Image (cartoon, rainbow, N blue to C red):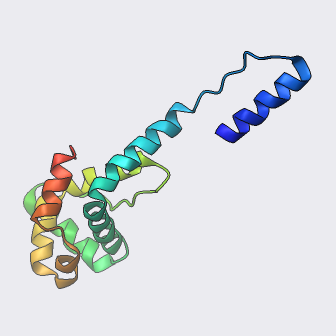
Amino acid sequence: MIVYGEFILGELEEEFQNLDFAHYRCAAHVLNLAVNKGLSVISESVRKVRSLMSYIKNSQPVRDSLKSLCKVKGIDYLSSELDVNTRWNSTLYMLEKWKRMEPALNLLAADDLSVHQRYLNNVDRVNINVSGF
C-alpha cells in the first residue's frame, strides 16, 4: 500500500502537478496488524486451542462425547470453530467458544487421552484469561 501510494503520488505530480496527495493506511489493516502482534505474545497457547478445536471438529465420536458432557454440565454445546489468519476476530470467536465450553472440555480431557495430549496446561489458561478471553 505504501509503495502504491508513492506510485500514485508520482503519477499525480507528473500529470497534474498535484503536490497535495497524502497516503492514509487502511484502519482495518492497521488494526489487524496490531491484534496479530498482540496475539504473538500468547501464540503457543492459541496454537494449542486451535489444535484442540481442529481435533474435535474432525472427530465425530469426540464431538458426540463433548455434546454429552455439555449436557451434564448444563452448558450449550458450541460447534468447534477454527480461526483464520487474516481475520483476527475469528481467533476471538475460537477462544470464546473454548472458554464457554471449558468445564465440559476439562471432563473430556480427563476421559480422552488424545484430547488430554492437546489440552491446555495452567500457563496456557492464564495466558488466555489474562488476554481477556
Q: Would residue 41 appear left or right of 127 to someone viewing this image?
A: right
Q: Residue at x 20, y 74 (%)?
A: 65
Q: Farthest residue toward the right?
A: 15
Q: Nearer the viewer, residue 99 or 121?
A: 121
Q: Residue at x 13, y 68 (%)?
A: 121
Q: Residue at x 77, y 17 (%)?
A: 19
Residue 36 seen in render: yes
Q: Position of residue 51 (x, y in %)?
A: 32, 71
Q: Would residue 84 appear left or right of 106 to someone viewing this image?
A: right
Q: How many marks?
A: 0
Q: Would residue 27 appear left or right of 55 to someone viewing this image?
A: right
Determine which quarter of the picture holds residue 103.
Answer: bottom left
Q: Quadrant of the N terminus?
A: top right
Determine which quarter of the picture holds residue 55.
Answer: bottom left
Q: Nearer the viewer, residue 116 or 11?
A: 11
Q: Position of residue 129 (x, y in %)?
A: 16, 50
Rendered position, 127 above or below 115: above
Q: Would residue 61 appear left or right of 26 to someone viewing this image?
A: left
Residue 71 seen in render: no
Q: Farthest residue toward the bottom?
A: 113
Rendered position, 124 above or below 63: above
Rendered position, 60 above or below 41: below
Q: Nearer the viewer, residue 59 or 43?
A: 43
Q: Position of residue 17 (x, y in %)?
A: 86, 17
Determine which quarter of the picture holds residue 18.
Answer: top right
Q: Residue at x 20, y 43 (%)?
A: 132
Q: Position of residue 48 (x, y in %)?
A: 27, 68
